[in-house]
Amino acid sequence: MRKMKTLFKRQFENHNIVKCLNEVEPECQWVLNRRRLGNRKN
């Protein structure tokens, strides 16, 4: 199973997440554009 990308960019310090930014990751922009349907695993 592959890990899912996070929709929003995160800010790291010393390998820890410090803050979640209001910027969308470029490779996840398709979610907001509704170009494809997301998958759901049962």
Image (cartoon, rainbow, N blue to C red):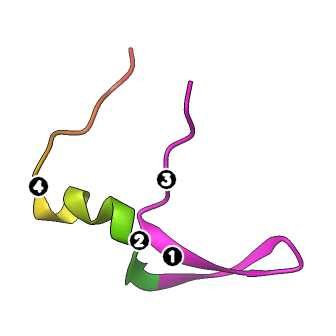
Q: Are marks 1 and 3 in contact (CB under 8 Å)?
A: no
> Secondary structure under badge 4?
loop
Q: Amino acid at mark 3?
A: Lys
User: In x, y percent, where is residue 35?
Assistant: 10, 52
Mark 2 and mark 4: span between their CA atoms? Answer: 15 Å
Q: Are marks 3 and 4 in contact (CB under 8 Å)?
A: no
Q: For mark 3, what is the residue?
A: 5
Q: For mark 1, what is the residue?
A: 9
Q: Are marks 3 and 2 in contact (CB under 8 Å)?
A: yes
User: 39 above or below 13?
Assistant: above
Residue at point 14%, 44% (across, down)? 36
* First of labels 3, 4 by sequence position: 3
Residue found at the far right of this picture: 14
Q: Is residue 14 left or right of residue 5?
A: right
The verdict on residue 9 being magenta is yes
Find the magenta span and give its range: 1-21
User: In x, y percent, where is residue 40?
Assistant: 32, 27
* First of labels 3, 2 by sequence position: 3
Q: Amino acid at mark 4?
A: Arg
Q: For mark 4, what is the residue?
A: 34
- Front one among 8 and 30: 30
Q: For mark 2, what is the residue?
A: 25
Residue at point 38%, 14% (across, down)? 42
* First of labels 2, 4 by sequence position: 2
Q: Amino acid at mark 1?
A: Lys
Q: Are marks 1 and 2 in contact (CB under 8 Å)?
A: yes
Mark 1 and mark 3: span between their CA atoms? Answer: 10 Å
The verdict on residue 8 being magenta is yes
> Secondary structure under badge 3?
loop
